[in-house]
Image (cartoon, rainbow, N blue to C red):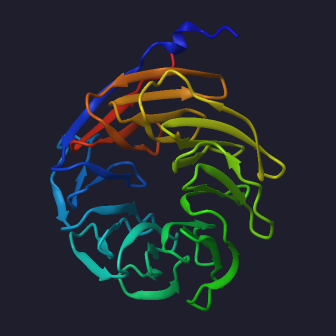
Amino acid sequence: MIYDAALLEPRLTVSAAYELGEAVRSLAWSPDGEHLAAASLGGEVAVVRPRTADRFVGPLAVLEAAVTGLAWCGSTGALGAVTEDGRAFIMEPSGSCTTTKVAKAASDLTWTRGGQMTVAGIDRAVLLDTSGRLVASLPAVPGGACVVEWLGCSIRGSLFLGGAGGIESYRMSGVDPDPVPVARWPRAAVVALAVEQSSSTIAAGTLGGDLELVRPGHDMSAASRLGRGAVSSISWRHGGGVIAVVTDGQVKVATTQVHGQALAGVREMSGNPGWITEAGFAPHDGRLASVDQGGGFVVWEPMTTPDPLERSDLGEGLGVLAWHPDGRSIAVGGDGGLVCVVDIGPRP
């Protein structure tokens, strides 16, 4: 197949760059896209405004432990963070910060649309309200939970916890604050989760490089072996039907079939010689971006060609990325504390 050469011309511009004190572990854009939060291995949390003239940059807080998760609350504008010593932080736009000890160690968080923070801990998972008050507590997956996702994102949704003992799901009634256990899939250790809301499909990546697909009310799909090492990230394309998985330092893209419970057409993206650490689809289309340990930043359109459309070397090992909500720029975080915002130019 012949591709338009113009599509392969780089259209990347670094529009902003910042430095944290240690390796960047988490990045998150606010829902309106005005603020970018970055958190480091040393516990520093900074908020920047890359698209404004004053571009404030500075520490919002120093949490004194490695930050393992970072997410904005869409309903209140608060920024949530969890640390490896088991604390949860809710940082309000007013500048106030609430701290709650939730577990022996915490590894992931997400928010419901109603403003409840859900935290995955090694010994339990919890739901907190916007003031940091405990709403509900439930046992973690045997061996400890490391990832958490909501299907439905509301108080009437379904909660999924992944960890060493597989996956456990809970349903919220909307009246009773305690989640109701629904199902358990005690398969291999789950280290990554991603939910595709339109098809109600949950993708689970395992420590052994497998990808398993789950739909509530159905059996778990047969495992698809995509690598030998742990799955480090999973991302669904906007609208579903296509999924990107990073394992063994490579990103592989597959289509789903049979109501989202089987993989077909798995192929590896080419043109990135570095060890890929994370990949993610754009919020509104089929572009896929990745970062690697050698400082490489690559953008593909995997349903058109496995070859890169755009690529750049940012000079230091990169571990995390986050698309801006409008899809016109991407934030990336480096092992030396670098935070870059890379703008993607319009199509020629």
Q: Quadrant of residue 121?
A: bottom left
Report the label total.
Answer: 0
Residue 157 showing in the rendered view: no
x and y, in percent, of residue 58 in the image: 15, 53
Q: Quadrant of residue 131?
A: bottom left
Q: Nearer the viewer, residue 286 or 224?
A: 224
Q: Please state if 143 lies on the left or on the right of 198 as rendered.
A: left
**Relative to 37, does residue 188 appear above or below in the rendering?**
below
Q: Nearer the viewer, residue 143 or 155?
A: 143
x and y, in percent, of residue 332 in the image: 34, 40
x and y, in percent, of residue 187 in the image: 66, 66
x and y, in percent, of residue 323 in the image: 44, 42
Residue 243 showing in the rendered view: yes
Q: Give the position of the N terminus as an image quadrant.
A: top right
Q: Residue at x 82, y 52 (%)?
A: 259
Q: Nearer the viewer, residue 83 or 56?
A: 83
**Relative to 344, does residue 229 appear above or below in the rendering?**
below
